Image (cartoon, rainbow, N blue to C red):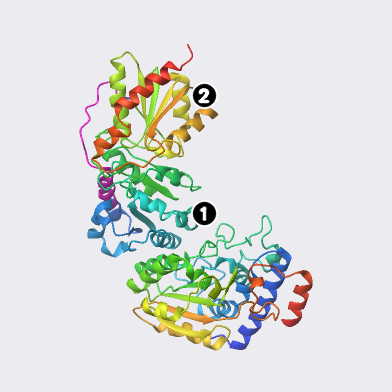
Amino acid sequence: MPAKTKFELKLGNSTREAFGRTLVELGHENKDIVVCDADLSKSTMTVYFQQEFPDRFVSCGIAESNMAAISAGLAYAGKIPVMASFSAFVMNKGFEQLRCSVAYPKLNVKVVGTHSGITLGEDGPSQMSVEETALACALAGFTVIAPADDASCKALFRAAVAHVGPVFVRTGRPKAPTIYNGDRKFEIGKAVELVEGRDATIIANGLLVAQAILAAETLESEGLSVRVLDMHTVKPLDRDAIQRASAETGAIVVAEEHLVDSGLGVRVAQAVAETAPCPMEFVGIQDTYAESGQPDELLDKYGLVARDLAAAVRKVVARKRP
Amino acid sequence: MSRPIAELQDIAKRIRREIVVMIGAAKSGHPGGSLSAVEIVVELFFNTMKIDPKNPKWPQRDRFVLSKGHAAPVLYAAMAEAGYADTPLDQLNTLRKLGSVYQGHPDVRFIPSLEASTGSLGEGVSLGLGMGIAARLDGSPSRTYVMLGDGESQEGQVWEGAMAGAFHKMDNLCVILDYNRIQLDGFVKDIMEVAPLAEKWRSFGWHTLEIDGHDPAAVRAAFAEAAATKGKPTCIVAHTVKGKGVSFMENNPKFHGVAPTPAEVTLALQELQ
């Protein structure tokens, strides 16, 4: 049952740390898993796997195109390659190889992007990724997952490896607020209703799930009952949960740490348009590149905190038909 | 036991005819770079490679990746002649037509016996590396052969793969460079010079040899030398003639990517008797 009580949001592990730890567990369970790295293992946390299974760790050099096609070759030969780098590099520099050598033959390759969004922080826009979800979703046959916290990332990365076919998993650099305890079950393509609500729905993923919960709490004190959905799977979308949210609450806000006009929001809008149209508002990064700063400062400056989500909810509720 | 060279020469001649006829029937395709690669592909599929066309997914088989995927007709004809169930000889003339297994570039969705879908240039060396690393992890004797074009060598990823192949000491990997000196827009030297190719591969740490890619004995010997080379991968720079075997196609940039007319097909078949 969705929680109705107030959440106590404490910082837990980053989702990249959750990925790195889970990868080692999976390495023990499945000897076919091979990890490909492009000189960022200490940042993507595949270094844990390297320490445990040096023979199954392939250094590809700072050459993401090479890494993507090496992963494809491993998959052709029956391995389960997990290739990881910053989202900005693995998707942008590896995109063509992910298209022609992975997506097109529909190979069983797991692509993990770390340091996604702008909360990578101090390194600035050359390392930030504000378009990885758009690119991943543009690869036909890919499953695209963006977990919110430690527990969901562990479970969803496990599900990604168990799934046969190409998957992109989007993770982040900073410690993530803990949303789930360890008991929750997760299913690819099935959204999680975290807060019940009647007046509007916030659909979010990644770090914005915590902001959505905070926004819902603020709005509750104003007399607005806001549903919160963790849409951890961007592709395939949970169209049933979206249709219910639209039909039952009549207003939807989508929030993501990604360019606002090419990520989760537009995909949800398409599903809403095709099922049960309702007013919508969108919270995300506008048509720009960010700057250096601390993650919290950046979320605040670029309009991605609870305050911004609450404002969007008030706006969308005002647009509802009487 | 090696297959007699004379037998392979007969097969090569049949494959050349099939290439010309199927591209003529398709009215589009790449005859020049298919004809330049015939002796190499024939030696691989009919002598050097340990493959079983009746059991195409035999785990310890050798693998062939056509990185220059536009030369698909030579691969299709060789696989059809070798007797793979999913490459029927009597359907070669459906090349490039809707529903045909013989897609414009190699596509594993239509021909599962293929080792890779290719066509976007520059990706084959990396694909071969992944296959080679998998074979090493499995303790398999499987060897992987990757055929590159010379124009294709302008792609940066080729050199990412070259660096990685030597670094990982991939002695189960062999690259064959079909050095026919012509690419789509003209002669390689006029588009973007890639020479000296053998020196480049050697300096990247590969065992590198140069051969006449139309001399069957030289091709065979080169593959034997590659297999005997330990601790590093091998690159065979095969000097070839674009359009080899058809006089009006030889060294003619036009026939990189243009199909012969019906009259030209007839003329070509007379030369390929």
In this view of the protein, which residue sits in the foreground, A295 or B115? A295
Q: Which of marks 2 and 1 is nearer the N terminus?
A: 1
Q: What residue is at 46 percent from the left and 47 percent from the top?
A: A142
Q: What element carries label 2?
A: loop
Please check the rendered image and state whether residue A88 is part of the magenta-colored stretch, yes or no.
no
Q: Is residue B68 above or below residue A175?
A: below
Residue type, mark 2 in image: Pro
Q: What residue is at 40 percent from the left and 45 percent from the top?
A: A132
Using the rendered view, name the quadrant where residue A81 is placed.
bottom left
Residue type, mark 1 in image: Tyr
Q: Label 2 crowding class (10 Å Cα cut-off): few <14, some 14-19, many 20+? A: some
The residue segment tinted magenta is A3-23
| Chain at tag 2 | A
In this view of the protein, which residue sits in the foreground, A177 or A239? A177
In this view of the protein, which residue sits in the foreground, A322 or A228? A322
Q: Residue A277 carries which label?
A: 2
Left/right placement of residue B32 relative to residue B167 reads right
